[in-house]
Image: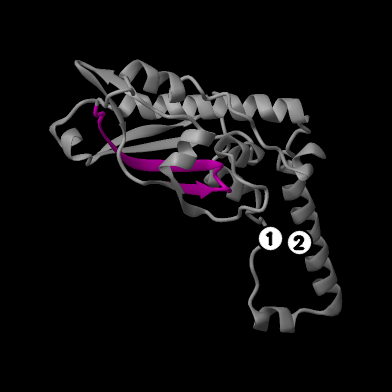
């Protein structure tokens, strides 16, 4: 199985989960129920004020997402899907298991804005699953048809579905599936197949009304 190192699809550093969690770390010690019961009313008020100040400070330290026009969202989504498709192609190399359609790829990617993820894959705005499958035909239509040339042939997807996992906190995702050695058929030459999918990654990006209002 081939596993690509996680990469931000627009080459911008994304804060890690550990870094974000540190923002919520509190300098005020956590108190037990008994300790709170033993505190006077004035002490409880002061303790509450300190907690509110810390929460306000932590929230202000979290960077707010920048506004993004529909045009910018479409451009970033197309760029992200191109990087994704090319990243999968780089993993597609000939192995004996190709003939059986059992060669696996695992691509780890990351986006700098979670609003890019759904348009990148052509998903509806209502989609809320973190782990799901996409049919290979849908992936071809909405993302592209990753293919790699080898001597006397080419490599292409072999499974009926592609597995996708999405982590909104990390803004990272994992795409996995299988590939096989392409089979030449009459009236459907290799060059024509490549032209239909490999260079058709700038397909229409569907942007929801909510995204238009960002």
* Cα–Cα span, label 2 and label 1: 7 Å
Q: Characterize the magenta stretch by its predominant secondary structure.
A: strand
Do we see residue 103 in this rendering? yes
Image coordinates of residue 39 in percent, x first then y, are 76, 79
- Dot 2 and dot 1 residues touching (CB under 8 Å): yes
Image coordinates of residue 143 in percent, x first then y, are 51, 33
Of residues 137 and 124, the one nearer the viewer is 137
At 74% from the left and 25% from the top, the residue drawn is 71
At 26% from the left and 28% from the top, the residue drawn is 182
Image coordinates of residue 171 in percent, x first then y, are 56, 42
Q: Quadrant of the C terminus?
A: top right
Report if residue 178 lies within the magenta region.
yes
Colour approach in the figure? one colour
Of residues 141 and 77, the one nearer the viewer is 141
Above or below: residue 30 compared with residue 67 = below
- Classed neighbour count for the residue bearing mark 1: other residues with Cα under 10 Å, few (<14), some (14–19), many (≥20): few
Q: Quadrant of the N terminus?
A: top left
- Residue furthest to the left in view is 96
Q: Which residue is mark 2?
A: 51
Sequence-wise, the earlier of marks 2 and 1 is 1
Q: Secondary structure at mark 2?
A: helix
Of residues 165 and 28, the one nearer the viewer is 165
Q: Which residue is mark 1?
A: 28
Above or below: residue 94 compared with residue 174 = above
At 20% from the left and 15% from the top, the residue drawn is 151
* Residues in magenta, as a range: 164-183
Report if residue 66 lies within the magenta region.
no
């Amino acid at each position: 199985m081939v596993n690509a190192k996680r990469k931000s699809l627009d080459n911008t550093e994304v804060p890690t989960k550990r870094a974000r969690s540190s923002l919520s770390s509190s300098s005020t010690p956590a108190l037990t129920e008994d300790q709170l019961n033993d505190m006077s009313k004035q002490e409880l008020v002061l303790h509450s004020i300190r907690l509110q100040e810390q929460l306000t400070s932590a929230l202000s330290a979290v960077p707010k997402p920048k506004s993004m026009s529909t045009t910018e969202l479409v451009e970033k989504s197309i760029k992200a899907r191109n990087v994704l498709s090319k990243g999968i192609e780089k993993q597609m190399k000939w192995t004996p298991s190709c003939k059986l359609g059992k060669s696996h790829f695992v691509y780890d990617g990351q986006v700098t804005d979670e609003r890019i993820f759904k348009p990148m894959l052509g998903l509806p705005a209502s989609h809320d699953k973190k782990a799901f499958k996409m049919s290979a035909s849908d992936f071809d239509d909405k993302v592209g048809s990753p293919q790699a040339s080898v001597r006397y042939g080419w490599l292409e997807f072999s499974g009926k579905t592609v597995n996708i996992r999405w982590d909104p906190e990390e803004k990272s995702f994992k795409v996995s599936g299988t590939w096989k050695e392409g089979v030449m058929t009459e009236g459907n030459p290799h060059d024509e197949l490549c032209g239909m999918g490999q260079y058709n990654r700038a397909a229409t990006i569907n942007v929801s009304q909510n995204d238009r209002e960002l």
